[in-house]
Each structure stands twice: as C-alpha cells, then as structure tokens.
Image: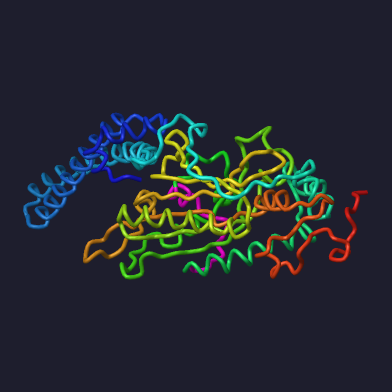
Amino acid sequence: MLDIRFIRDNKDLIKEAAKKKRVDFDIDELLSLDEKRRMLLQSVEEKRAEQNRTSNSIMRFHDEVKRQEFVQEMRALKAGMQEDEEKLREVMKKWQELMLLVPNIPDISVPDGESEADNVTLKEWGNKPEFPFNPKNHIELMEKHNMVDFERGSKVHGFRGYFLKNDGALLSWAIWNYANKFFLDKGFNPFIAPTIVKKEFFYGTGHLPGDGNDLYRTQDDDYLSGTAEVPMMAYHSEEILKKEDLPIKYLAFSLCFRREAGSHGKDTKGLMRVHEFYKLEQLILCEASHAESEKLHEEINRNTEEFIESLEIPYRQLAISTGDLKAAHVKSYDTELWIPSENAYREIASASYYHDFQARRFNIRYDNSGVKTYVHSLNGTAIPTPRVLIALVENYQNPDGTIRVPEKLVPYLGKTVIGSPEEQNIPEKDEVI
C-alpha cells in the first residue's frame, strides 16, 4: 500500500504505474473519494469537539431552562455527528477497497511489456546435456524407479495428486537438508512457518484480492498459504523493530497450497503444477533505502542461482516485464531450469522487492533516530519441491535409465546412482490392484 499523501502528490506517477502494469485502476475515483473522506472526517471531528464544549456548558449552568436549551442543541449535534459518521463509514469502506488496488511503482530498470512474453532473458548458465538417446521425462524416470505414485495420489487427493516415495522421498529430504545448510551459511535464521494464516495477512502481502482464485479457504475463513512469505511478514506485524537489528534475514520452510485455478489444461500430468508442495523461502526486512533493497534483491536472487549452480543444473534468469509484474512488486526476477524432455526452461524460483508497500499494510516499522519508519521487504524462493525434481532427474539421467545423484546431494542421500541394482533393492513398480 502506498501512502495516500504520496498518491495525492504523485497522481501522474500512479497513473503511469497502472498503465505500465496493465492494471485497470481509476486514480481520479480514489482522489475524489479521498476528498469526501477528509471532509467528513473534519466534520465529525468538529461536531465531536462542539459536543464536548456543549456538554461542559451544561455542567456549568444551574438554570434548568438554559440547561434544556443546551441539551436540545447537543441532541442536534449528536444526530448530525451520527449521520456524518455513517457516511464516513461507507466512504471509508470504498476508500480502503480502492487503496488496496493502487499498484506499486515499478523500478525504472523494469523492462516495459504487455505480458510474460515480454520478459527479458538476462543470462543463461550451464551446459545443456546432449543425450545420445531420446531423454525420458520425469514421469517415466520416477515411475520406473518407484519414486512416485500418481495413480494412488489421484485416488487419495484427486486431480494433480501424487505420492513421493522411496528415493523420491529421500531425494526431497536430501534437497531440503542440503538447502538448509547452504542458505543458513548465508546468514539466514531458520523457521518452520504455519500454513493456515488469517485472511487479513493475505491482503497485507498483496495476494488478496488479486490471487483469491488460487488460494484455498478454510471453514473459519482463513486461508492456506502458497508461500511462507505471508506468515513471515505477519510475524512482525504491528511491531517496531530496532534499526541495529536490520536487515533481518529469515529462511522459512513450509507446506504450500495453490489451486492452480488459471492453469486448466496445462501440465496436467507430473509434478510441475501440483496443489500442494514444499518450499524454502528467503525473506528480508531492511532499512527504508532503495539502494539497500536493490542490493539485497540481487543478493537473494544470486543465492538461489548459486544453489542451482552447485547442483549443476542449467538455468536462465529473467527480468519480469511491467505487464507481468504483480501489483505489489517494484521489481522481480524469475529463475528457470532446463527441462530436457520439453527442450525448454521452466520456472523454479522468483525474487522480488516491495519497498514499504507491504510494511505499511502490516504496520512494521523501525526506530530511525526517533522517527518511526516503515521497513522495506523482500522475498525470494530458495528452492521448491517437488518441482526441482523434474529438472534434477531429467538432466542427470543415463542411457540405461538410471539417474546420477548430484555430487552435493550424495552425502545426504547416501548413494551416487538411483536405479542401479547394487544400490536399490526395491521393486521397480508396485501395481495398483
């Protein structure tokens, strides 16, 4: 959320931001409503002050006739104040709804574009494997080695359901354990975050109202989070932090949920678009400095790249264009891994910064030499599972269908190859009866 004073003083800048982000937002409607809000607020305050003065006057008069005159005057004031208060409540409700729709200002370095088709490739890393055979996709490989069960997953969960098992489960744990060590060595504090989060905090991060169709709602009108960003921002809501404690760096692990409501017909098989998954998320709160936000944004994005590089999986980095940039974001990068069976890159992580957009909604501030100042917030995917398994097993497959284990994961998995007879003593696949 932007400061309403900033919005008033920078009307044209907000219009341009909405235009760049392809957001249908009427700034004039908000400013007109804001003027009504301010006038009603002033009227209520004036009538309340007059009511207090009249009440004090009544206390001073002993003449009953005079007292009754003031009582009648106070009743009229009270009726007028109640009428204005009701109007103010109605105006405030609409004003707050419009304030939630004001887009953040994209950084000048964000490439202009209409949609994700206009995202810009900043770099590519790694050598794409050249197989002397037709590479199998992750479904074939993982089913061959009894690492996953989609059939029973669909039976138990429904559409997009899955079970990871045997080396599929162990490989996931290996990735989590290695990722924990890797990112904690970068100075992050480890957390396991809750998944069920109060509705208000999804408005805080900007996931509501825009992403409502992709969220699971509970019976109590809370929501299941699709990222630890939401509970970790809520962690410090309504708090004043110490400047010397900034930046605060959290690495949060959580179970995540997404409906994938807008992806009907896309990736209906396999592990690319599942309804529930696990994710390690980087989240940082820092001083209110654009330069600091920019520096830390590059840092968290680079952390994820270095992690992927250590697994020796080819990837590319994208700068998200204005037309694909979410309303709350100042700037975002996406990281995509190479998927041999598709001959294409697919998204694995994103990193974004917000300035004080989220902190204003959460009311997270720090004591800046006596001035209470809103922090800046940033977040970035460390690594998600099971999606990373797709690139891992496909890029590391051998001609005989076995799967090499990345060197960094060997100490955590306890083997160098998945599928070799001497290392795996389980049936290839147990059939569903």
Looking at the picture, tell me which residue is in the foreground, 135 or 383: 135
Looking at the picture, tell me which residue is in the foreground, 416 or 265: 416
Residue 263 in the image: x percent, y percent?
63, 35
Residue 395 in the image: x percent, y percent?
70, 50
Residue depicted at x 13% and y 47%: 50
Residue 15, quarter of picture: top left
Q: For the N terminus, give its image quadrant.
A: top left
Residue depicted at x 54% and y 58%: 306
The colour scheme of the drawn protein is: rainbow
> Going by the image, does 195 lie left or right of 274?
left
> Going by the image, does 121 lie left or right of 104?
right
Q: Is residue 55 magenta?
A: no
User: Magenta residues, as a range?
Assistant: 188-205
Residue 252, quarter of picture: bottom right
> Going by the image, does 63 lie left or right of 376?
left
Residue 11 in the image: x percent, y percent?
25, 34
**Furthest residue toward right:** 433
Residue depicted at x 84% and y 51%: 400
